[in-house]
């Protein structure tokens, strides 16, 4: 199975840098890197109304899109669960 390429939306990188602790950033990056091998792990859920997926890491959520044709995972948003779904 081919490995997927990760692409971060610039705002998602800013959100990642703004996380409160280095430990939180490290855990989230480990989850994101694991997506390269398996973009649809057991703990991910498809969001209603869009071709987006979400993954949990503690109180944080990672919103991403899978582009199977190009083997790309596009990280759209990273944030606290209370704020991440707001537009």
Image: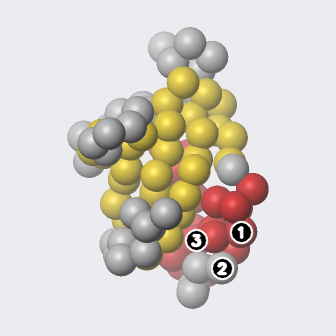
User: What is the C-alpha distance between the residues marked 2 and 1?
Assistant: 6 Å
Residue 34 picture location, percent across and down: 48, 43
Q: Is residue 80 left or right of residue 11?
A: left
The residue where tag 3 is placed is 25
Q: Which of marks 3 and 1 is nearer the N terminus?
A: 1
> Mark 3 or mark 2: which is in front?
2
Q: Which of marks 3 and 2 is nearer the N terminus?
A: 2
10 Å crowding of disc 2: few (<14), some (14-19), many (20+): few
User: What is the C-alpha distance between the residues marked 3 and 1?
Assistant: 12 Å
Question: Which label number is shown at residue 70?
Answer: none
The residue where tag 2 is placed is 18
Residue 21 picture location, percent across and down: 57, 85
The residue where tag 1 is placed is 14
User: What is the C-alpha distance between the residues marked 3 and 2?
Assistant: 9 Å
10 Å crowding of disc 1: few (<14), some (14-19), many (20+): few
Mark 2 secondary-structure assignment? loop
Q: Is residue 62 visible?
A: yes
Determine which quarter of the picture holds residue 56. bottom left
Please identify the residue farthest to the bottom as the structure is shown: 20
Is 63 placed above or below 40 here?
Answer: below
Determine which quarter of the picture holds residue 2. top right
User: Looking at the image, which residue is at 54% across and 78% down?
Assistant: 23
């Amino acid at each position: 199975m081919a490995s997927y390429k990760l692409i971060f939306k610039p705002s998602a990188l800013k959100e990642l840098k703004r996380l409160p602790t280095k430990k939180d950033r490290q855990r989230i990056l480990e989850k994101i890197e694991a997506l390269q091998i398996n973009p649809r792990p057991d703990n991910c859920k498809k969001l209603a109304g869009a071709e987006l997926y979400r993954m949990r890491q503690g109180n944080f959520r990672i919103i991403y899109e899978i582009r199977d044709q190009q083997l790309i995972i596009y990280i759209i948003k990273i944030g606290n669960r209370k704020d991440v779904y707001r537009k």
